Amino acid sequence: MTHVSARRGAVYVSVAATAWGTGGAAGSLLFETGGLGPVGVSLWRYLLGAAFLLVLARRAPRAWNGRVLLVGAGMAVYQTAYFASIAHAGVALATVVTMGATPVFTALGSRFLLRERLGRVALGSLAAALAGLVLLTGESVLRADASAAAGIALALTSAAGYAGVTLLSRRGGDDDARAAAIGGFVVGAVCLAPFALAEGVVPEVSWTSAALLVYLGAVPTALAYALFFRALTVLRATTVSIISLGEAVGAALLGVLLFGEHLTPLAWCGCALLLAAVAVLAARADTA
């Protein structure tokens, strides 16, 4: 593989975040049309994601080290917790809490574990992005009833797992990035398989559910994670997690278009602020 520049890495993360923004909606639709639960959706997502990447790579990675095993376990935790959060709190709230907490957890972990310091650009972008998230979701959070509390707790669990995967994947080359993506999916699927079998792993067969599964495995999984792990070879962990916040905007817009959710003027301002913060950080990724 050719070397990836910091600017190109920022583009990779931006594309991955856009793809991830559609993953929650696809999973939510699979709950309805495929008769699958959160664990079942996650299992199919990882199996199909690994299959697509293996076909594209034409060969399996030469070796999977202990870090890949930890990455896979972390992926199993955060993906299932995310879909379970959606089931309890809805797409928008689950995505926003997960995405909002992730860069905070990542920033703390990268500072104390990786000794990475945040520059002024990254700090300003993080503050602006979190402010945008508050504006985007503040009203939804205030309206959340007691039943959403479990969803928020699951979203925080997902954020912790996501941050852990990001930090574990930070130190590696191009071959490690490919191994992390494929190995992470395989290990994650193995971790989830017993729980998926208990919950129900066979989807209700229809053209809609089949198309959703293929899309979920190909775009927000194989494509997005391949770009994500590649970007981590050249960008700071916190920089990657902040740019990934663009996913929240995509999820919110899909909530409006597909699920009839409404955004207030303040929420639209939050979208704009969040996108501006991500754009600034992406443009200055080499100095952040």
Image (tube, rainbow, N blue to C red):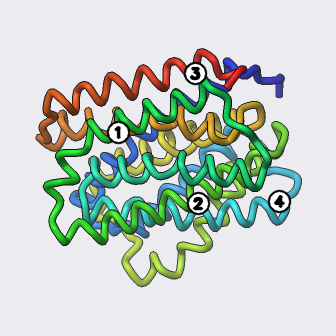
As shown in the figure, which amino acid type bears the numbered disc 4? Trp
Label 4 Cα crowd, 10 Å radius (few <14 / some 14-19 / many 20+): some
Residue ID at (39%, 28%): 274
Element type at marker 3?
Answer: helix
In the rendered structure, which disc, 2 or 4, sits on the residue that comes first in sequence? Answer: 4
Tell me the residue at 13%/55% (across/down): 143
Q: Residues within 10 Å of mark 1 (few under 14, many from 20)?
A: many
Label 2: few (<14), some (14–19) or many (≥20) C-alpha neighbours in 10 Å: many
Residues at circles 3 and 4 in contact by the CB criterion of under 8 Å: no
Measure how far apart labels 2 and 4 are at the Cα level: 15 Å
Q: CA distance from mark 2 to mark 3?
A: 25 Å
Q: Earlier in the sequence, mark 2 or mark 3?
A: 2
Q: Nearer the viewer, mark 2 or mark 3?
A: 3
Which residue is under mark 3? 282
Question: Residue drawn at (84%, 39%), measured in percent from left and top?
Answer: 173
Do callouts 2 and 4 mark residues in contact (Cβ within 8 Å)? no
Residue 256 location, quadrant: top left
* Mark linked to residue 64: 4
**What is the CA distance from the residue labelled 1 to the residue labelled 3?**
18 Å
Q: Which numbered circle lies on residue 75?
A: 2
- Name which residue lies at 53% across and 32% down: 243
Q: Label 3 sits on what residue type?
A: Ala
Residue 90: where, in percent of width, then height? 24, 55
Q: Quadrant of the N terminus?
A: top right
Task: Give me the disc on residue 133.
Answer: 1
Earlier in the chain: of badge 1 and badge 2, it is 2
First in sequence: mark 3 or mark 4? 4
Comparing labels 3 and 4, the label whose residue is closer to the camera:
3
Question: Which residue is the extreme one toward the right?
Answer: 62
Compared across the picture, whether 42 is left or right of 9 comes to left
Q: Quadrant of residue 118?
A: top right
